[in-house]
Image (tube, rainbow, N blue to C red):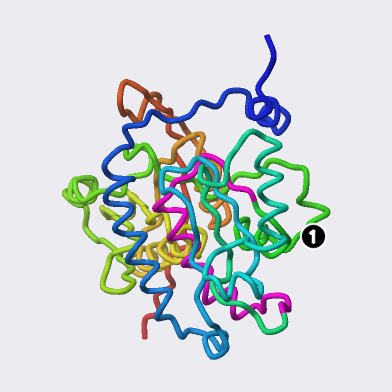
Amino acid sequence: MAIHPRSQHLREIGIVRWQRRASSTPLNKADGGSIGLKALSDKVRQCQACSLHLRRQNTVFGHGPIEADWLFVGEAPGSNEDKQGLPFVGRAGQLLNSILFSIGLARDEVYITNVLKCRPPANRDPMGEEVVKCEPYLHDQIDYIKPEIIVAMGRFAAQALLKSTSSIAELRGQRHEYVEIEQQVAFHPWTQSAFSESIKGADKCWVVEYGNQVVAYLVQSICAEESHILNLAVKGARQGQGLGRGLVKKACADASRNGVITILLEVCRNNLTARQLYESEGFLVFGRRSNYYRSGGRSEDALVMKRVLKPSSVTTQ
């Protein structure tokens, strides 16, 4: 039996099985997500965070269905995009259309956007400050769209998505993992019920707010010389910005000031990003809890990690 070009391309990049979603898109993505994406587009239209807004004709937010499985991310709008307010038009758009056709996709099946939403003068490369100011909009788009596959077109797009300084030659031709888009609430809790449940046995809760909304929190219990990090969660669109690391540092420093010697936590065995974060902050694996995380008939083991703090010195006169 002949293999469809799309399936063949997916197999070549390491994705063996891919199926189109059913036509009945979940409410939280197609309906609520569309409202959120429209509000984000309006916010971008009013943005004056960097000097690019002084020369733009139009902001170029993005184009495509919110239920798209594929997200294509370019670097910045060009002259044609600035005039029309749409991404990848003109010669760049023709090339992209040809690429999509070659793998069995149509333009109206994918979502297309850029890291920058305004055109840099004379189509120059994006500057560091411009990327810093604009990429949160991209991460918010990803959070609303929740694509299965993200295609980075160009060095700046790849570096912004992967938080990497590697060259395009080093990154090209490899399959990379974007910061996990939360799907299973039990494995990456970001709901009011999960938050409320986790603080029942807590002594302290550290919260990060952005625009009057909670975007990250850490829940901690303390008993004598031992502390337990019960829950650390960062909203999907704000992951990769150092919020989780900042909360862990804050909790550890506070625990040390309160005479805590040992800090414990559990982390999903397959959550490599979280494990690397904790290891970089001095936590070591010393045990495992079988079937600790449960959701929808599935279960995941948890690794128990521990950090031993140096006792705070006390000077007596």
Q: Is residue 174 left or right of residue 40?
A: right
Question: Magenta stretch?
Answer: 123-151
Q: Amino acid at mark 1?
A: Ser
Q: Position of residue 20 (x, y in %)?
A: 48, 29
Q: Which residue is mark 1?
A: 167
Q: What's the residue at 57%, 85% (across, down)?
A: 52
Q: Position of residue 312 (x, y in %)?
A: 42, 69
Q: Nearer the viewer, residue 211 or 96?
A: 96
Q: Is residue 220 left or right of residue 67?
A: left
Badge 1 crowding class, 10 Å Cα cut-off, few under 14, some 14 to 19, many 20 or more, is: few
Furthest residue toward top: 1
Q: Main secondary structure of the magenta part?
A: helix
Q: What's the residue at 45%, 66% (across, down)?
A: 246
Q: Please check the rendered image and state whether residue 3 is part of the magenta-colored stretch, yes or no.
A: no
Q: What's the residue at 36%, 72% (across, down)?
A: 42
The quarter of the picture where residue 272 lies is: top right
Q: What's the residue at 51%, 26% (across, down)?
A: 19
Q: Position of residue 113 (x, y in %)?
A: 55, 60
